[in-house]
Image: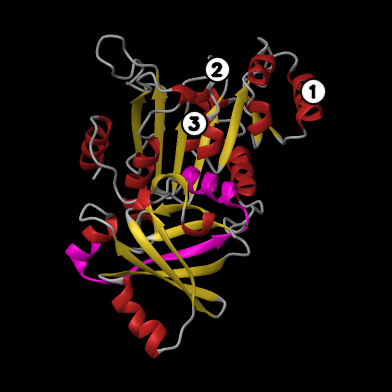
Amino acid sequence: MSRELAREISALEDGGPSPPAARPPLVVGITGPPGAGKSTVINALLGVITEQVAVLAVDPSSPYTGGALLGDRVRMTNAGPAVFVRSMASRGHGGGLAPRMRDVLSLLAKQGYRMVLIETVGVGQEEMDIAALADVTAVVLTPAGGDSVQAEKAGLMETADLLILNKCDLPGADQAEQDLHEATGLPVARMKAKDGVGAAEVLTLIRSVSRRERPALIAGFAVDHLGIAVVSLDESLLFYEGVLGMRVTHRETVEHEGVRVAMLDAGESRLELLEALTDESPIAKFIAKRGPGMHHVAVRVPDFENAIGTLRDSGARLLGEPRIGAGGHRYVFVHPASAGGVLLELIGHEHP
């Protein structure tokens, strides 16, 4: 399975198509200044993790081959048969991650991995992507060397969930722990990672932080409308309006989507009939492939921007950028591969 998975990841890195979006239950980001011992911390954690786990170690790219410079991962000696370790080259991608990281997480979820540890390149001014991608972000620091100053400059103190004070046998560890906790209010875990000291306690802290109550993605949502692809609006309205007696509340032509739209009142929700303007319209292509019928489900979201950000962070596949649709509302479509086979439209609550 590991060889097959490695080949699939290589295909992604070479520009292959994205797999259906999915996500392992727990994604942990490990970041921090160079030399703080990120790889050693991960190795110590592997010694106490009992479930199937994957490690994605993002390294700088070779200027000659584009591959990962530190790809041997020789420090991860605790990587047993149940551990999948993969070095991924940053390939010039900012933010400390590899460009296809979300797709790789989807592959790992498909293979049943319950936990993924992601080691970033190292603290830099753009090393922020991991905080958005991971469920838990841990910053590894040491008592000396100005690590905390460097991490604070990079902005990681604002996005970290916990701090790991590695090499805690060095002088000044007690004072460093106190200073970090007072400055950030974050939990500080002490480790001597090269000897495995503190690994079990750090793993327990990671799990407890991951179970913190997080805001719901679309709390207070409502079904706004059901979209129905039709060959002719006028002919369809003979049934919906003429036979059923439903009331047309709005008609509009949306040029950038290539459709004519008729909205019908359906109590607390609505029906949206969609007629193609041209043969190149998405609705025309849908009808040519599947025939007229149910096209999409539209969900109204009170905090549109937050929902979009959360979907992106989770690796969900969005179809383009948010746009203005019929009636003046903002909308974006979520690919059926990310929504259980249903084309899902997310729309802003504040539309007219």
Res. 77 visible in picture? no
The reply to whether dot 1 and dot 3 touch (C-beta < 8 Å) is no
- Residue type at mark 1 is Asp
The answer to if 308 sits in the magenta stretch is: yes
Name which of mark 3 and mark 2 comes first in the sequence. 3
Which residue type carries mark 2?
A: Gly
Residue 70 locus on image (x, y percent): 36, 17
Q: Quadrant of residue 276?
A: bottom left
Residue at image mark 3: 42
**In terms of image quadrants, where is residue 349?**
bottom right
Any mark on residue 179, and which? 1
The residue drawn where x is 37% and y is 23% is 73
Task: Tell me the kind of residue under disc 3.
Answer: Ile
Q: Residue 306, position in %: x, y? A: 59, 47
Please state the total of marks drawn on the protein image.
3
Q: Residues within 10 Å of mark 2 (few under 14, many from 20)?
A: some
Residue annotated with mark 2: 124
Name the mark nearer the viewer: 2 or 1.
2
Residue 111 percent coordinates (x, y): 31, 50
Left or right of residue 302: residue 340: left
Residue 150 horizontal/vertical position (percent): 64, 15
Foreground mark, 3 or 2, reads: 2
* Secondary element type, mark 3: helix
